[in-house]
Structure formats: structure tokens, C-alpha cells
Amino acid sequence: MGLDYCAIRSKVLRARKLVIRGTAAAGSGHPGGSFSMAEILGCLFYKHMRYDPRNPQWEDRDRLVLSKGHAAPGLFSNMAVAGYFAESEIDTLRAFGSRLQGHPDLKCPGVEFCGGSLGTGLSYSVGVALAARLDSRPCRVYSVIGDGESDEGQIWEAAMAASKYGVENLTVFLDRNFIQQDSYTERVMPLDSRLGDAEEISAMWLDPDRWRTGDKWRAFGWNVIEIDGHRIEQVDDAIKRARAHRGGPTIIISRTIKGKSVEHMEDNPQWHGKAPAKEMVPIINAELESQSIIAPSIIAGDMTNLAAEVVRCAEGRADYIHLDVMDGRFVPNKTFLHEKVKELRPLTLIPFDTHLMIEEPHRHVRQYVDAGSDIVTVHAEVTDVDTFGEISDTLRENGVGVGLAVNPDTELPEWSLGFLPRVDQIIVMSVVPGRSGQKYIESTHQKMARLMPVLRDNGFAGYVEADGGVNLENAASVFADGARAFVGGGAIVSTSDVRASIRGFRQAVATARRRMLLDMADGLGGSDLVERWIDLHVVGARPAEVRTIAQEAGYVAR
Ligand code: DX5
Ligand code: ZN
């Protein structure tokens, strides 16, 4: 069974866009804390929680208690995507008479708790979980609390009670974004350790010796799991572990970034409670849609010790592990087959991005699903409407993302167009497949220019993964062409410091994205809008960096 990674990721994106749409329409609201918990809610809504949008009061449903109720746009947007109401209802956010108020209210079917008075949701959750136990109902209670909210004494009273009564059907997420209403939590009321006046918030992130929050909860008798709350694979795994834990409640301390996915909102206390200006919405949406994925290809490393290569990529913070399967028939080379994928699977939670360069993929795809792939990509040259249909059904039924690859000499075939709305990933090969370390074929740029409109016109909602000869020099132009996932063999796995190479890729792509967004601002509103876009960036080196890019591009004066 795959992780359902692509499905969750794309719904999280839809929900984030609805948060922007709703808060912009209302002219107020809380995008920052909605975005820090976006992946947490995504994993709950689209994988783990049991509920029925047509029967919100179903007695055996799982309960989601949003204790940090000001992040209501994050809750409502997911409820819309999950089917409780039409997505367009988000336009009524905070309007007089709307079901979607500034804080969750029971008058909206599906809302479990009237949030807003911070600190009370956890006590309520303990009560609901205990009631389910008394009634012998199978429901689980999931609560999301904030770190600023943890200043409330009632949180800790509830923590004691949950522990005393061994409430094992309760799972709490602490959305640990380090920012509360006016400032950084570690300045207002430290949960980990005090942040000095001259220190950046990153000082806390970089020094695990200063993380004390887990110790506090352990001292209260809780099962504590600590994760990166934006990594879908980690959130998913933590929920499974919490469910398996017996004898008491679990807290998943999720380190997150307030405003995550919109650079000017990230780690910026201003965006606790403020709405984006309407003119900025298209630019913000473009930014949300262009989050990138770095996928190191392990065959560029030591083929006699692929396990070590997976570990290097995991320690290097890869988004995917790209696995190039070659059968010696579709391409002259042989690399490894499904047994190897299965052997590597326990080494990391990071999604396995399996690229099948094999003949007759429909006869083998099941083996790669069973081996633990999260995305499987097959080649257009060896599939047709029937076999690809069969393959994509198998993948989807098993929570595996669906990928289609084209070789340098292949255009996207006519038969594939009808599948596009349900394809997650298109691999555009920029080398003749067969081995890593080849040179990027320059005509791929023109091919991408032909391909992108075809994808858009046929309802493609996934992303293009660029594979072959992608490196730090061409990553920006590959991004500008439209690719959002980047395979790196020679440029990542062959280097001695995988982590630094991945960081280099991220920076190159981030610069290209900034440029694209400035370009969009210029097109929509000239230098006036460009100036306003730049001014939104206030944290750290961002304002100067974004301004320099705008100057270099000639959008604003030097
Ligand atoms: C090529 C493979 C690629 C390749 C990438 O047949 O599909 O994934 O290993 O390696 P580089 O980035 O070195 O081209
Ligand atoms: Zn590949």
C-alpha cells in the first residue's frame, strides 16, 4: 500500500488556495496558523479520519477538535474539499449570517467544537474521548492545539486528566510554529527555551538541545512523537503510531512554519491574523502551485551499496527517493528490480518515486506497489490506452501516485490526454534513459514549451518532473519551463555532500520562483505592484534578495 502522497498533497494545495480565497474575500482572518497545520489536517481528512460529509452526526465518526480556533479558515477549507459544503461557500467567510465564522461554530454541520476561547479544546477532547470509551464506540478524537495556546493553564490541567484516565483514543497535534499573536513564542512564554533578543528564531530550530516541549509532555505521562509537521510521510506515520499506542494519550509535536508555502508569510508574525490583498491573490496562488520537489536518483551513487545511498539522501532531506528501475530490455542497462525496492523500503519514510524503465510495465506494476512505492511512473513508449488504464487503476486503488514518462524523442501520445486529469506526475526525460551523468538535451526547453499548454488544456492538475542532466546551472531554466520536481543523479547523489547539493537545488529553484512571481506582479500591475510585492517580504534577508532579483530583471530601478 502506498502512502496516498500525491492525493493528499494535491488536496492540501486546494485547501491552501481556499484559505487565501476566503480570507481575501473577508478582508480578515488567520492564514498563518491555517498554513502551519495544512499537512496535519490533510493527512487527517484525506487518509485517517472516518467521517461522512452527508451524515455529519454519524455516531461512530472520528472527531476533529480545532482547539486553536482562530485557524478556522484552515478547517473550513478542508471541510469544503472533503465535501461538507461547496468550495464557493468559502467566499462567505466571516460574513454576517454565514456558517463559516471567524472561529468554528457548531452551526456549521461537521464542526465539532466552538473554538476561539483558547485553551479549552483539549479538556473538551478528553471528555469526548472518555464518553466514546464509556459507550464502547470505536471513535478516535484528534485535537489540534497551538503553541501560543499552550500558555493557558487549562491545557496542562487537561494533560494531567488525559494521562490519569489513560485516554488512549485521543491524539493531539501541537502545531509548533514558534509564533503567537504578537511575537515568537520563545520570547512571549518559552515552551522550549528562551530566545534572546538578538537571536533569530532559527536558533531554536538548529539546536535540538534547546527543545524541551517533548520533555514537558512526557513528564505529564503522555506518549510523545516529534516530527516535521510539513512532511506528509511523517505526519502519516505518527498518526499510525499514535493509533497503535496503548494505555494513554499521544501528542504529536509537529514542528511547523507559520504561513508555510507563501514566502512572505513564512515565519512572519504579521501573518498571524491578516488577510492578503485581493490583487495579490493570483500571485499567491501561483506561488502555492509552484512548490518544488527534489528527487535524488540513487543509481548515480554506489550501485553496490544502494542502502547507503538511500540513507545519504534521507539525511540530506530529500523530498523523494528517485528509483530508476532498468530491465536491460527497454533500456540496454540493468539496475535493480522490485526485490531491491522492497529491501530499501524500511530505511526511510520518504516517498519512493519509482521510475520504471521496463518493457510491459502492466505485467509488473503490482510488484512495485507491493514493494512500497509511493509514486510509480511508466513509459508512454510501452503503454497504450488499455494497459495504462489498467496500471493507473491499480496504482490509485493502492494509494500510489500515477506517473507517465516520455523519452526525448516522444511527444505525449494522443491516447494519454484523457487520462491527464488523473495523472499525478509527468516525467519529461531530458536525456536518453539508460544511465545517470549524461548531458541535458537542450531541445527539452522547446518540448516543454509545447507540452505545458497541452497539459493545461487537458485538465492536468499534477506536476512535471524533469529527469536527466538537471543540475545547479540549469535548474532555474528548467523551473521556468514549468517543471516542479527535479531528479538529480550526477548533480546530487554523485556529490560528496548530498545535503549541501539538495540545499543548492532548493535555492536555485527558490530564486527562479521569486523571479516568476515578480514577473507576474509586473504583468498584473507594473512596477507599482512589484514594489508592493517586494514590500510584503520583511523577514531576514528576504527583502534585499527579492529586491535585487527585481532590479536585475528591470522591474524596479536600481
Ligand atoms: C536516466 C534516469 C535518471 C538519471 C538521472 O535513465 O532516469 O533518473 O539517473 O541522473 P542524472 O541527473 O545524472 O542525469
Ligand atoms: Zn529516472
Image (cartoon, helix red, strand yellow):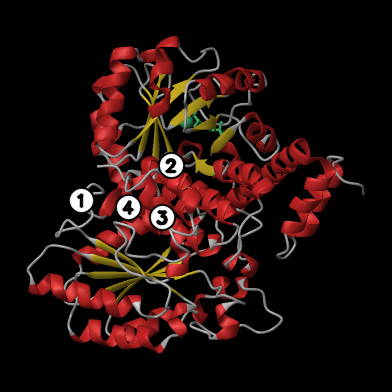
Q: Look at mark 2 in the image and give the residue it sits on.
A: 10
Question: Could you tell me the amino acid type at mark 3?
Answer: Phe
Classify mark 1: residues with Cα within 10 Å, few (<14), some (14-19) or many (20+): few
Q: Give x and y (percent) for residue 11.
A: 41, 44
Q: Residue at x 46, y 50 (%)?
A: 90
Distance CA(mark 1)–CA(mark 2): 25 Å
Question: Could you tell me the amino acid type at mark 1?
Answer: Asn
**In this rendering, the label closer to the viewer, 2 or 3:** 3
* Residue 220 visible within the image: no
Secondary structure of the residue carrying tag 4 is helix
Q: Give x and y (percent) for residue 85.
A: 35, 46
**In this rendering, the label closer to the viewer, 4 or 1:** 1
Secondary structure of the residue carrying tag 1 is loop
Q: Look at mark 3 in the image and give the residue it sits on.
A: 76
Distance CA(mark 3)–CA(mark 1): 17 Å
Question: Could you tell me the amino acid type at mark 2?
Answer: Ser
Q: Look at mark 1 in the image and give the residue it sits on.
A: 55
**In this rendering, the label closer to the viewer, 4 or 3:** 3
Secondary structure of the residue carrying tag 3 is helix
**In this rendering, the label closer to the viewer, 1 or 2:** 1
Classify mark 3: residues with Cα within 10 Å, few (<14), some (14-19) or many (20+): many
